[in-house]
Image (cartoon, rainbow, N blue to C red):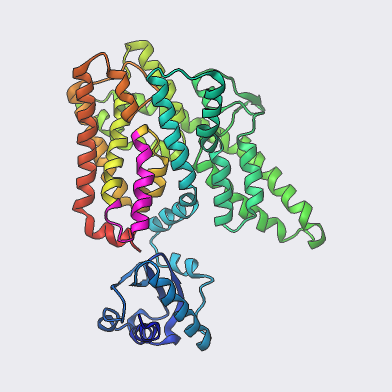
Amino acid sequence: MNEQQTINDVIDAVGGTSNVKNYEHCATRLRLILKDDQLVDKAKAERVTGSKGYFFHTGQHQFIFGTGKVNQVYEAFAKEMDQTETGSQQAFKEDAYTNLSPVQKVVRTLSDVLVPLIPALVTTGLLMGIRGLLVELGVPISADWYAMFEMLTDTAFAFLPVLIAYSATKKFGGNPIIGIVVGLMMVSPQLPNAWSVASGDASPLHLFGLSISGYQGSIFPAIIVGWLVSKLEHWFRKFVPQMMDLIVTPFLTIVVMLTLVLFALGPILQVAEKAVINSIVYVVQAPFGIGYMLYGGLQQLIVITGLHHSLSIVELGLLNTTGENVLQVLGTASMAGQFGAAIAAAFLYRDQVKRSNAISAAIPTLFGITEPLLFGVNLRSMRIFVSGVIGGAVGGFMTYVFQLAATGMGITFIPGLLLYTGDLTAMLKYVAVIIVAFVVGFVCVQVQRGRIIKEINQ
């Protein structure tokens, strides 16, 4: 490919180098942000030498060249821009954000924070699912080997707030090391484990009349921590003398941040958890299957907030009072709907690497681990996520029709089959709920494929 001819064609199509405000490239596309979009000649843009296509979305003019070739084109374009002393890639993301709607900005921010963590979550999620399956199958594992297995499977999820706080602090322009320190304090062993407190195996600390526990598995609190760390750090730096900045600014940032986390954010989350639990009980009891549909559709929203560890209290209560746990089926239906939407979306990616990554992020869902799927695929487009919600809701209605409920808790999706081994009919109904939710989520994405393709390939 003649890169110089390609660059000449691009510059001619976008109104000259003086009209280029910013530029960047991804795995397959050269992306340009222009000063005046009206100067673009669309006909010329679609006929650029070597380009496989052109489109405009969220303020970005994107020329598709494919993996490998785009790197050569970008290098040639950067040299041309340097020669003309215009354009800068430094603030490309900031410029791109100005062209997004408020909802798109929120989704893009979540994506920027959480997508870098996907490889770790995918790997440990798969290992966690395999471990749960082996345990339920009765495979003998010694205490020592089980401890090693727990180290492999639980570390990333137990310290998830640390990873998120680091990524969020970096994203918002703060010192990521301070983010790590505050994240570690959120899951410090000196604080009662959040999961143990939720299950009744541990009691929270009581300070100033408040109940204090760890933040294991929390997502949004860690994102808030990253944002506040960056804001506090910049604010303190405005009046802390430069010669004392190295010590005073981090000290004040960590102390103030930890105080807010334990004594402000913690109580708010406790109220939220109680509200979630009470609402779930109320919703599921709604007549005509409406509650089943709402829970089946929206259960993964609870996972996004990180409050899902509290659901074990509701499940235990259901098992103790009725001997059945309908939330296991409904939770699986919600997962299956999102799984179907994610698989459908994966095949809409033009780039093979992104397609492979999307499928990899979705696979742990088969074992009941949905964080990689949610943050790596579905939340990158609300159309995909809502498609999964619809699939889960239909699966929830199927659960109501079948009057299906599990006799245990703790495992979902494929491992959840083990809860139905004593009743073949119930097992077949369970599989039918999964298939229906999956297919509906898949089809809903396909119905919107045109718009989703533009969103996820930008």
**Residue 411: image location, x then y, percent:** 38, 25
Above or below, comparing residue 106 to residue 432 in the picture: below
User: Of helix, strand and loop, which mostly describes the magenta segment?
Assistant: helix
**Residue 66: image location, x then y, percent:** 34, 68
Q: Is residue 275 left or right of residue 252?
A: left
Residue at the spot 61% in from the left edge and 42% down from the top edge: 183
Q: Which residue, as the protein is rendered here, is positioned at the far right?
A: 243
Please tell me which residue lies in front, 205 or 454: 454
Work out which quarter of the rendered image holds the N terminus and state it: bottom left
Residue at the spot 38% in from the left edge and 11% down from the top edge: 320
Examine the image and state in which quarter residue 264 appears.
Answer: top right
Q: Which residues are magenta?
A: 346-366
**Residue 294: image location, x then y, percent:** 28, 34
Residue 80 visible here: yes
**Residue 307: image location, x then y, percent:** 46, 33
Q: Is residue 400 left or right of residue 16?
A: left
